[in-house]
Amino acid sequence: MSYSRNYDVLIVGSGGAGLSLALKLADHSMRVAVLSKFALTAGSTYYAQGGISAVFDEDDSLESHIADTLDAGAGLCNPDIVRLTVTHGKSSIDWLRKQGVVFTEEQTESGEKKLHLNREGGHSHRRVVHTADATGKAVSLSLIERAQEHPNIQLFEHHNVVELITAPSDDPAGKRVTGAYVLDTKKQQVKTIAARVVVLATGGASKVYLYSTNPQSATGDGIALAWRAGCRISNMEFMQFHPTCLYHPQAQSFLISEAVRGEGGKLILPDGSPFMQHFDPRAELAPRDIVARAIDHEIKKRGIDCVYLDISHKSESFIREHFPTIYRQCLKFDIDITKQPIPVVPAAHYTCGGVLTDSYARTDIANLYAIGEVACTGLHGANRMASNSLLECLVFADRANEDILQRIASIPDIPEIPDWDESKVIDSDEEVVVSHNWDELRRFMWDYVGIVRTDKRLSRAMSRVELLKKEINEYYSHFRVTSDLLELRNLAIVAELIIRCAQQRKESRGLHYTLDYPETDNSQPPQNTILKP
């Protein structure tokens, strides 16, 4: 048989992690394919506002960045991984600048220019390198441009992975990855792509919730693919809810950057009174889990729709210079942030758990790597600190690159791969089943497995997801795959993993807060939650 495609490395995902790795590998003559489920700019990187944390200020230190990260992670960070990541902060920024990323600068008293640094929640110093309030867009567009120009990189938009392909191996896991079956959503055709190495860079899973700051692509595809292939998954109970998502009936998933609070923005109730001082001495600069729970508490306690974030005490020129994207977006909804507060609510934002990896981004399956939000490296622990996510993408792309280059020559040839079999399925005439199940899944996850949980809520959610999985699997076995069906199938698996992890943790820690166990259990060393297939 002949393959549809054959590459050295197949990277699933076109965000900051995937494209960084693609460029590094391609510079060493690797033949690299990069798949994007939608357009190349449809991932979370493009929409990241805040920035990338790295130590540049002379008053700051690596030790301080490490300490802040460990504190935010509530005892579950891997100290070695934290140190590894933080130590590579400056070099990661330098690499991005070489790729053409232009960061916001300021002029010193001596007339020289230096990087302007923001301060965000959980950070004790200003250390967030940024491009105004559209850092992710600047990073994404620069990397895409470089990748489009590179002769060793082939980019595939509108390609969604159906399943990873594995073969027997002498590896301890007993299998190795050899490629993937991929749905070309434009042609509605499943292709076979063979590769000696496969890298999951698919982002997170926040679309498992009804309200999310994430783009439509964040459906946990990589986590579900790795789980079905036999990888361990860790810490899925730690789903981060960003405290401040724009609350407006016509606004979809628009994030109000943490940098607004970093620059003095105040959270207030409808009557104008502040409230964060009652929850944490750091007030608006407390870590995200604390701020999100405080807002959720006030909304439920008072029966209000939202709270407000007020930066209007700053000058108009300051606001328009520092937050041009937020200013323009809010103005579309008749909210002038230079004169009035912004209505905000919490929304699902970041997946701190994921596919368990080592310090070189290797998973349990030979030749399968995971980088970026899809992975659980040990950096974030029970709560990711602001702007450590893009840093993790860059550092672990570099680590994976180093390991792949060292090992790829010893990887055996790819065995024969059977074609995707559609002989026993038909086109669906009941697409309403997919849309209905998608809506039901996201609603009960929001209601029962959200910011505040209980054993009873988790049990109800598990009963629902088990029924949905049976219905989805039956549908999957009878009809030709579509992108919507693949996402729904993956989301159901992710929902189950989140619930199972949450049920195992009999304490409140970091992003996991349960009314049945409201205190953190310090009677023994904290343990990561690890699920085995």
Image (tube, rainbow, N blue to C red):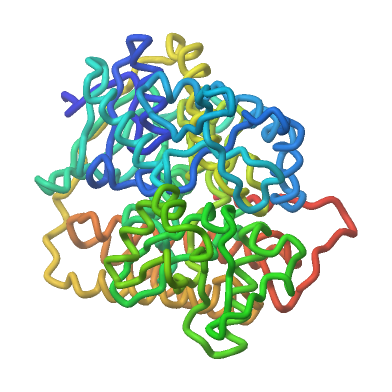
**What is the x, y in percent for residue 389?**
53, 42
In screen coordinates, is 450 left or right of 76?
left
The answer to whether 465 is drawn above or below residue 114 in the figure is: below
In screen coordinates, is 314 left or right of 323?
right
Q: Quadrant of residue 179?
A: top left
Residue 141 shows in this picture: yes
**What is the x, y in percent for residue 521?**
83, 63
**What is the x, y in percent for residue 349?**
48, 58
Q: Nearer the viewer, residue 90 or 283?
A: 283
Residue 211 shows in this picture: no
**What is the x, y in percent for residue 281?**
77, 64
Name the residue at 48% across, 27% down. 397
Q: How many marks?
A: 0
The answer to whether 442 is drawn above or below residue 183 in the figure is: below
Q: Nearer the viewer, residue 413 or 389?
A: 389
Name the residue at 16% across, 57% down. 425
Residue furthest to the bottom in view is 303
Name the residue at 46% across, 77% down. 444
In screen coordinates, is 404 left or right of 189?
right
Name the residue at 60% across, 25% down. 88
Q: Quadrant of residue 481?
A: bottom left
Quadrant in which the N terminus is drawn: top left
In screen coordinates, is 72 left or right of 22?
right
The answer to whether 482 is drawn above or below residue 194 in the figure is: below
